[in-house]
Amino acid sequence: MRRLLPLFALVSTMSAYDLHLQPKRLTPEVVCFFGEPNVMNTTNNGNMVNTCYIDTSKNYVVIDSGSSYAYAQSAYKAMQKIKPLPVGLVINTHVHDDHWLGNGFFTQMGVKVLGSDDFKHNADTHVPTRMQTHISPEAYAKTVPTLPNETITADQNLSIGNQTIELRLMKQKAHSAKDMIVYLPKLKTLFAGDLVFNDRVPSLSGGDINGWIAALEGLKSLNAATIVGGHGYRSDKEAMEMTYRYLTDMRSAIRNALDEGLGIEETMDKVVMPSYQSLKMYDTLHRSNVESAYRTLEWEQR
Ligand SMILES: [Zn+2]
C-alpha cells in the first residue's frame, strides 16, 4: 500500500481543479453553463459567469472561455461527454477577465480565439488578475492570461458547419468600451455578453448608460427567441428586460435629480431604486452605478 502513495500524489497534482460545471441545453445545438450570479469568490471559484457551446455539426464554437483554465477545462470535459467534437473557434464577447481567462486552455490546443480590437486597448491583463486575487489558488492554477489571437474591427458573418454566426460590435461604449454580441439567425439565438444581466445588479463601471440602453434597443429588433446574457439564469426572449428596465429607470431618476439641481452625492442618496434592492450585488454595485451614470448624464444638453 505504501508504494502507491507517490503515485496518488502525482495524479492529484496533475489533475486540474474541477469546477463540476453543469451543462444546460437550450436548443438542440446550444448548450450553456450558467454561473452563480454573484461576485467571484472562493466559494464559486469563478463559476459566476455564463459561457456557451454551439454545435455547428462540424465542431463547437465557444462563446466566452470563462474565468480560468480550470473553468475552460471543466466545460470542455462536460461537452466531450455529451458529444465528442473538437472546438473550432472561441469568441470573446468583451475584455472583462471573467469572460476570457479560460482562453489559454484553448490556445494550447491550437484553437483560434477571436475578440474585438478592444482587447488591444482595454483588456484586464494586469497581474495578479482580478480573478486571481478573489478565487482560490487551486482554482486559478494553470491560468495564463491569453488575449484573442485574432481581433476584428467590424461586424462579420461566419459560416461554420451548418450555422451562420453573426458577430456584431456595438458602435458605442455600452457595458464596456466595445461589446460584441453573437447571433445565430437560424436559431434566433442571441449571446449578448454583459449587455444582459439577470438575477443580480449589472455593473456600469467603465460603461456608458446611454450607449448601453441604445445597444439593447438595437438588439430588441432582432426579436431573438433565446437570449443568453453574461450573468444570470434567464435565457428566454424576455431575458434582456431586467437590464433594460434597471438602466432606463436609473436614467429617468438621475435626469429628474439633475433637473432638480442635485449634486452627485445627493443623487446617489436619492436614486435608491428599491425594487432592485433584493437583487444580489445591490449593496456593492448600485451606488457606484448611479455615480457612473450621473457622470455621463450631467453633460447632456437639457
Ligand atoms: Zn462579466
Image (tube, grey):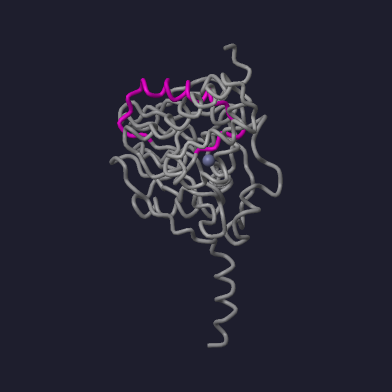
Question: Residue 58 appears at what percent x and percent y?
Answer: 37, 38
Most extreme residue toward the right is 127
182 on left or right of 27: right
Count of marks overlaid on the render = 0
Q: Is residue 226 magenta?
A: yes
The picture quadrant where one finds residue 223 is: top left
- The spot of residue 266 in percent (x, y) is 62, 32
Residue closest to the far front: 260
Q: Which residues are magenta?
A: 202-227
| Picture quarter with the C terminus | top right
Q: Left of 61 or right of it: where is 154?
A: right
Q: Nearer the viewer, residue 288 or 149?
A: 288
Whole-percent x, y for residue 180 in the image: 50, 28
* Residue 181 vs residue 272, the one in the foreground: 272
- In the image shown, does 18 or 238 lie closer to the viewer? 238
Check if residue 205 falls in the magenta segment: yes
Please indicate whether residue 183 sits to the left or right of residue 108 in the image.
left
> Horizontal and vertical percent for residue 206?
62, 32
Q: Find residue 115 and report its image quarter.
A: top right
Residue 113, relative to residue 19: is it above or below?
Answer: above
Tell me the residue at 62%/38% (across/down). Answer: 147
Residue found at the very far top of the displayed protein:
301
